[in-house]
Image (cartoon, rainbow, N blue to C red):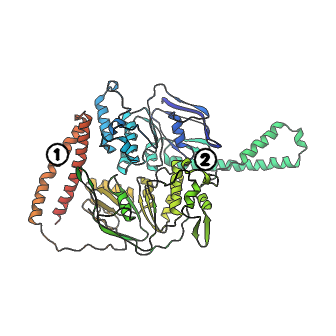
């Protein structure tokens, strides 16, 4: 029998007149992996904070097994100023004297730091970005190896490679989990149980996300069918109450009380509210944008320049829905900022069609001033919104489409949950009626129902779309084409969604050359620095050159590469062995980790250059 770790009994929490949940009870046992699902503003983060002892509550109890070791990853973590990254990562680590197998522990924390790409261990935490801070906090709770791990949106600010590693790490871990996440693939593959907060009550489901969807629909259908039966009985009793007022005085008061209980139950029904995003007719000309041989790099003190793009060419097609994926730091957001004119390329230019009106949803979040109310955010853009066909909506009516009630519209923005702020930001972008949407990590903090509606909207969007997202489920549903940023100016053009791309990569790693249905070669040799979409609108060709032989200098370069690549491979192998157990000093670990990443990058570049020269 599983050992109970956490028990929550009859817990009630409210903010003023708003009840978040009432008399909810549940438990988490050894080995359980539980996900908490609810709409934004329903109290998911508040519940986790209560369990962690960081918020109070009106009634009920929270009980842990005695001496249980608990780790908590907050949605927006913070550390005391002055700490180094290494100190923050290790602040909850057990003492050496407590470790029964110190070598295993050392291997564990080296793996975690490496996979989360935490290398600058002497950097002060106050200098980190929000995303870097989240990764440090995640490393801290994973290294501590608690018996119960509580995670609030653990995949936010992770790139796809990190998300997939974390997914695999948690699936094979012995830790019990209680987490909030919007990542539906993550839910499906990691969780064994789901708890849903709906209408202030808690509903448990024994199964993964797919099972939850099926059983939730059944629950709602059954509840509404039972409500209809109660209403029929209520009509009979109501008719009696109206026709025989005098007789009621001679009837049992219990029956009269039962009538009023019946009246309360008959008024209940679960109505699935949705964020209504209407697709309006918008004109898009035949010319969208052309990236003409873009070069972009950043200088770094004491290091080689960080090259984002080199002679990058791309001709964007009409109504294209493009996904951009890649590890953090490979230049995805920089590319968007150059397209929008917020960042200048070093050379090359973007030729943008005259009809294009961009709508940009930034991962930097919603800009608002202290004291700003929800409706002020919309009125700052327009008092009235043109819906097309002669229809107009006031700012207040438009907000109601996004589930902001009239009373909530006059709340201060700082009172909103993280997901509600994201929804308001999305409302602000869409009300400008753009014909080209650029969404940079739009799924962070949005609840699953809102994501479903947003996906439906984007699939039928009558304009152009670029999405940067680490949410694999979201990307699979809305894009038909990918640019894969590999770093060091290597950008791969892939005609398909993310799952298809991963399948192609797996096939290539098994020695196969993946060919898509259109016959486009997606092997490593293809499209190394330029990405030209396989669309009906042809890309402008490069200047052709006559076939030629290697120059003497290139022949020497090729020979040098054939000598240096094996040396780099040997160095990488030696560093892997050292990081797997041969080093114990934190400074040595940091230096070895940095050299390991640099050697891998150097080898990648040399391999690409070798391929270029070999094909001449």
- Can you identify the residue that label 2 sits on? 219
Which quadrant: the C terminus?
A: bottom left
**Which marked residue is nearer to the observer: mark 2 or mark 1?**
1
Quarter of the figure with residue 589: top left
Q: Is residue 195 visible?
A: no
- Disc 2/disc 1 C-alpha distance (Å): 59 Å
For marks 2 and 1 on the same chain, the one whose residue lies earlier in the sequence: 2
Vertical position of residue 512 compared to residue 9: above or below = below
Q: Check contact, mark 2 vs mark 1: CB within 8 A.
A: no
Q: Can you give x and y, in whole percent of width and height, for residue 477 in the image?
A: 45, 58
Q: Can you give x and y, in whole percent of width and height, for residue 287 in the image?
A: 40, 74
- Can you identify the residue that label 1 sits on? 570
Quarter of the figure with residue 331: bottom left
Label 2 environment density (alpha carbons within 10 Å; few <14, some 14–19, many ≥20): few
Q: Can you give x and y, in whole percent of width and height, for residue 431 in the image?
A: 54, 63
Q: In what element is the residue under mark 1? A: helix
Q: Can you give x and y, in whole percent of width and height, for residue 472 in the image?
A: 41, 53
| Residue under the point 56% across and 60% down | 378
Whether residue 593 sits left or right of residue 162 in the image: it is left
Q: Nearer the viewer, residue 438 or 573?
A: 438
Q: Nearer the viewer, residue 124 or 137?
A: 124
Q: Is residue 90 visible?
A: yes
Label 1 environment density (alpha carbons within 10 Å; few <14, some 14–19, many ≥20): few
């Amino acid at each position: 029998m599983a050992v109970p770790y956490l028990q929550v009994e009859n817990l009630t929490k409210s903010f003023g007149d708003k009840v978040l949940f009432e008399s909810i009870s549940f438990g988490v046992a050894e080995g359980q992996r539980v996900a908490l699902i609810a709409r934004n503003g329903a109290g998911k983060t508040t519940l986790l904070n209560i369990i962690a002892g960081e918020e109070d509550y009106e009634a009920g109890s929270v009980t842990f097994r005695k001496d249980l070791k608990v780790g908590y990853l907050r949605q927006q973590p913070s550390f005391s100023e002055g700490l180094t990254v290494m100190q923050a990562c290790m602040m909850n680590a057990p003492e050496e004297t407590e470790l029964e197998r110190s070598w295993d522990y050392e291997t564990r924390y080296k793996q975690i730091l490496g996979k989360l790409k935490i290398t600058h261990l002497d950097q002060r935490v106050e200098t980190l970005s929000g995303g870097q801070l989240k990764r440090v906090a995640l490393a801290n709770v994973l290294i501590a190896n608690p018996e119960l791990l509580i995670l609030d949106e653990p995949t936010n600010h992770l790139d796809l490679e990190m998300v997939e590693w974390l997914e695999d790490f948690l699936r094979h871990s012995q830790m019990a989990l209680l987490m909030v996440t919007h990542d539906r693939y993550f839910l499906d593959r990691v969780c064994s149980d789901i708890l849903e907060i709906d209408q202030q009550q808690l509903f448990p489901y024994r199964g993964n996300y797919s099972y939850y969807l099926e059983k939730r629909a059944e629950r709602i259908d059954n509840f509404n069918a039972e409500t209809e039966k109660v209403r029929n009985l209520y009509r009979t009793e109501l008719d009696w109450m109206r026709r025989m007022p005098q007789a009621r005085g001679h009837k049992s008061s219990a029956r009269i009380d039962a009538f009023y209980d019946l009246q309360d139950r008959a008024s209940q029904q679960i109505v699935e509210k949705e964020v209504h995003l209407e697709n309006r007719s918008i004109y898009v000309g035949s010319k969208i944008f052309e990236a003409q041989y873009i070069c972009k790099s950043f200088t770094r003190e004491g290091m080689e320049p960080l090259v984002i793009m080199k002679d990058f060419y791309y001709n964007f097609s009409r109504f294209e829905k493009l996904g951009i994926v890649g590890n953090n730091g490979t230049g995805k957001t920089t590319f968007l900022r150059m397209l929008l004119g917020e960042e200048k390329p070093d050379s090359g230019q973007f030729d943008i069609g005259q009809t294009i009106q961009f709508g940009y949803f930034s991962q930097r979040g919603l800009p608002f001033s202290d004291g700003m109310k929800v409706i002020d955010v919309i009125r700052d853009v327009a008092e009235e919104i043109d819906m097309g066909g002669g229809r107009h909506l006031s700012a207040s009516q438009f907000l109601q489409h996004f589930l902001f009630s009239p009373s909530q519209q006059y709340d201060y923005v700082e009172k909103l949950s993280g997901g509600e702020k994201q929804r308001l930001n999305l409302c602000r972008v869409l009300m400008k009626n753009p014909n080209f949407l650029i969404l940079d990590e739009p799924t962070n903090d949005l609840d699953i129902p809102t994501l479903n509606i947003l996906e439906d909207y984007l699939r039928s969007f009558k304009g152009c779309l670029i999405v940067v997202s680490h949410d694999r489920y979201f990307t699979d549903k809305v894009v038909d084409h990918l640019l894969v940023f590999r770093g060091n100016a290597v950008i791969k053009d892939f005609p398909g969604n993310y799952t298809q791309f991963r399948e192609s990569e797996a096939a290539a790693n098994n020695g196969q050359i993946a060919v898509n249905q259109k016959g486009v070669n997606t092997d490593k040799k293809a499209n190394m620095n330029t990405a030209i979409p396989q669309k009906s609108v042809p890309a402008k060709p490069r200047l052709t050159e006559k076939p030629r032989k290697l120059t003497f200098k290139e022949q020497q370069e090729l020979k040098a590469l054939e000598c240096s690549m094996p040396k780099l491979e040997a160095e990488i192998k030696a560093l892997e062995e050292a990081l797997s157990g041969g080093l114990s000093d934190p400074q040595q670990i940091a230096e070895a980790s940095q050299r390991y990443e640099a050697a891998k990058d150097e080898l990648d570049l040399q391999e690409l250059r070798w391929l270029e020269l070999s094909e001449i």
